[in-house]
């Protein structure tokens, strides 16, 4: 493992200025960018500090699931977002909106959907994920995007489920431009003081919601039909008897 002086063709200090990152580390290899972000938070790093890795050996998603990280194939980034205490329920959705906008900026003519609570979907397949973890006075947020993965790069259990930007668009994607767009959106969306999603962001989230009106199975509330996401970030689940429950945690699977 080594700390890089240059990343994507430019000195790391140049990227730090462009991204307004008080601290930026780019690594060729890390076990987990989120774990390193926790360490720099303990060392006093400020909000919007960024940790990048070309490869992860112990990347993870929600519930400790492994995140597959071929060297140089994807974007593996963690940042420290403002906030203390328990992160608001809608925070992963805001990060998801920022990531969706960034992908569409770097890859025009694609539309990115969001699957509650933290997946990015491109043409029906998962292209990325978000992991927000509270750590003392910071919110450590990991963002993984499949950029250059080929079909053979995914393990058998993800065949037909996962994709990458270049596999879908058949065009090269600049990871540097992707990160620039992502951090620009994060500075805007994750500096909002609102405790719930403002109207225009809730409308955008609703338009991107790939589960709306789909029959689903949830870990904590059983089966039902997803009826959207409320302004607090909860999934609205309609049961067989017509009652609607707010689901605030756990995984969800389309049936």
Image (cartoon, grey):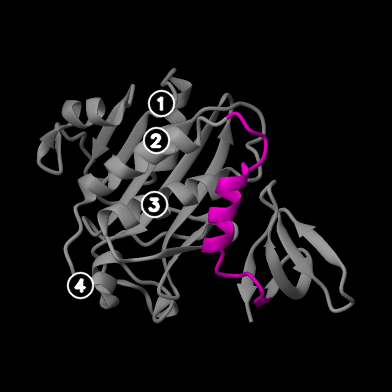
Query: Considering the image in quadrants, where does the C terminus appear?
Result: bottom right
Task: Tell me the residue that label 3 is attached to.
Answer: 101
Task: Tell me the residue that label 2 is attached to.
Answer: 36
Mark carried by residue 40: 1
Badge 1 vs badge 4, beta-carbon distance below 8 Å: no
Tag in front: 4 or 3: 3
Vertical arrangement, residue 127 with respect to residue 48, above or below: below
Q: Helix, strand, or loop for circle 3?
A: helix
User: Distance between the Cα atoms at labels 2 and 1?
Assistant: 6 Å
Q: Helix, strand, or loop for circle 1?
A: helix
Q: Is residue 192 magenta?
A: no
Identity of the residue drawn at 27% across and 77% down = 152
Badge 3 vs badge 1, beta-carbon distance below 8 Å: no
Tag in front: 1 or 4: 4
At which x and y percent is residue 153?
A: 28, 72
Q: Residues within 10 Å of mark 3 (few under 14, many from 20)?
A: some
User: Distance between the Cα atoms at labels 3 and 2?
Assistant: 26 Å
Vertical arrangement, residue 162 with respect to residue 94, above or below: below
């Amino acid at each position: 493992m080594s700390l890089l002086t240059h990343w994507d063709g430019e000195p790391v200090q140049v990227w730090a200025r462009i991204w307004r990152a008080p601290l930026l580390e780019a690594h060729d290899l890390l076990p987990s960018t989120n774990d390193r972000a926790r360490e720099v938070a303990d060392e006093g790093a400020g909000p919007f500090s960024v940790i990048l890795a070309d490869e992860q050996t112990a990347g993870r998603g929600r519930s400790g699931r492994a995140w597959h990280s071929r060297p140089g194939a994807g974007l593996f980034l963690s940042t420290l977002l403002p906030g203390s205490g328990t992160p608001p329920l809608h925070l992963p959705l805001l990060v998801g909106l920022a990531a969706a906008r960034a992908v569409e900026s770097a890859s025009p003519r694609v539309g990115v959907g969001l699957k509650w609570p933290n997946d990015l979907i491109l043409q029906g397949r998962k292209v990325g994920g978000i992991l927000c973890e509270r750590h003392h006075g910071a919110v450590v947020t990991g963002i993984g995007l499949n950029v250059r993965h080929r079909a053979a790069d995914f393990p058998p259990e993800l065949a037909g489920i996962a994709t990458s930007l270049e596999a879908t668009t058949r065009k090269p994607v600049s990871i540097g431009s992707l990160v620039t767009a992502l951090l620009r959106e994060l500075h805007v969306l994750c500096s909002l003081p609102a405790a719930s999603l403002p109207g225009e962001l809730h409308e955008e989230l609703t338009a991107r919601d790939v589960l709306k009106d789909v029959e689903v199975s949830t870990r904590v509330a059983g089966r039902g039909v997803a009826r959207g996401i409320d302004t607090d970030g909860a999934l609205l689940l309609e049961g067989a008897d017509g009652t609607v429950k707010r689901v605030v945690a756990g995984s969800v699977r389309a049936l």
